[in-house]
Image (cartoon, grey):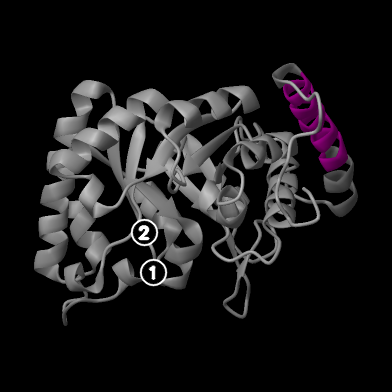
Amino acid sequence: MDRTGRVVRAPGEDRAGRMDRKRFLHVAGAAWGAVASAAAGRFVLNPPLDRIGLQLYTVRSLMAEDVAGTLDAVAAIGYDEVEFAGYFGHDPAEIRGWLDGAGLSAPASHALVEHLAGAGLEASIETAGVVGHRWLVLPWIGEEMRTPDGYRRLAEMLNSAGAAAAPAGVRVAYHNHAFEFDALDEDGVTGYGLLLEHLDPALVDLEIDFHWSAVGGADSAALLREHPGRFPLCHLKDLTADGRMADVGAGEIDWAGLFALSGTAGMRHFFVEHDSPGDPLASIRASYRYLSTM
């Protein structure tokens, strides 16, 4: 980064050099973790995560200045893949070129409601084909939709989007916050429960955000066990005892217990995220270090 905070490539740096550095960081991180885990008696995940991803919303301030440089910096830390939350005015082919240059893949992208219906969906599917996305994930709904009928209509819309995207090899998914776990009536019906009931698993997946699920009072492990195969994507950010969002490993979420359910849940893509990091690169380094050394 330069003194203004802008991420820049080193002079003469090429793809091979970046990939060599990435492989080195993987090996060095694993060696450091073996020593640290043995010394601290910490749980060691076996097998370890075979890929670690990043939701790029975490580094949006850097992306706004330099998308290519930010992707290079993410890859240099050791991340294997990313999930987009906007392209910052760049066309899909340009984005794909920068991903390829950094040695990253982008299996998923967040897409707003308007991007999952009609002409917006058609454009999203076309973009997914260029960039390499296999999932289009709805990350948020407005308060006006957070009613029993609203969740049912949302499920119908996502099912339709999933059916339209399937011929292109693209799936649709929904990402939760905490509000989906609020009771909507005296019987305790929740928005998340309605989505689980009405979304067609053949067409629509779920991207579970473990931080927000915990904030909402959900038992994430129980969700993974009770709905096998429905969670191919997840967001990783921690929750402290006093309710603050934290880097992965700096809070109280039982990551080892959740990752042990990966096979049951169908989890394949693990995206680190922090909604408001003080120092985005320091935050994603800390989360990567923890995950790569479990």
Image quadrant for the C terminus?
top right
Which one is nearer the viewer's eye here, 133 or 95?
95
Q: Is residue 200 visible?
A: no
The spot of residue 86 in percent (x, y) is 43, 47
Query: Mark 2 highlights which residue?
Result: 176
Horizontal relation, residue 215 to residue 188: left or right:
right
What are the residue bounds of the magenta stretch?
17-33
Horizontal relation, residue 201 to residue 257: left or right:
left
Say above or below: 110 vs 242. Answer: above
- State the residue at coordinates (40%, 66%): 218
Say above or below: 252 vs 262. Answer: below
Discs 2, 1 touching: Cβ within 8 Å: yes
Which one is nearer the viewer's eye here, 276 or 209?
276
- State the residue at coordinates (28%, 23%): 169
Q: Which mark is residue 53?
A: none
Mark 1 Cα within 10 Å, few/some/many (few <14, many 20+)? some
Within the image, what quadrant is residue 69 found in?
A: top right
The spot of residue 5 in percent (x, y) is 73, 55
Say above or below: 84 vs 186. Answer: above
- State the residue at coordinates (89%, 41%): 35
Q: Residue 29 colored magenta? A: yes
The spot of residue 145 in percent (x, y) is 18, 67
**Looking at the picture, which amino acid does disc 1 mark?**
Ala
Q: Residue 181 colored magenta? A: no
Query: Mark 1 highlights which residue?
Result: 178
Within the image, what quadrant is residue 240 found in?
A: bottom right
- State the residue at coordinates (62%, 23%): 101
**Alpha-carbon distance for marks 2 and 1?**
7 Å
Say above or below: 20 vs 74. Answer: above
Horizontal relation, residue 265 to residue 278: left or right:
left
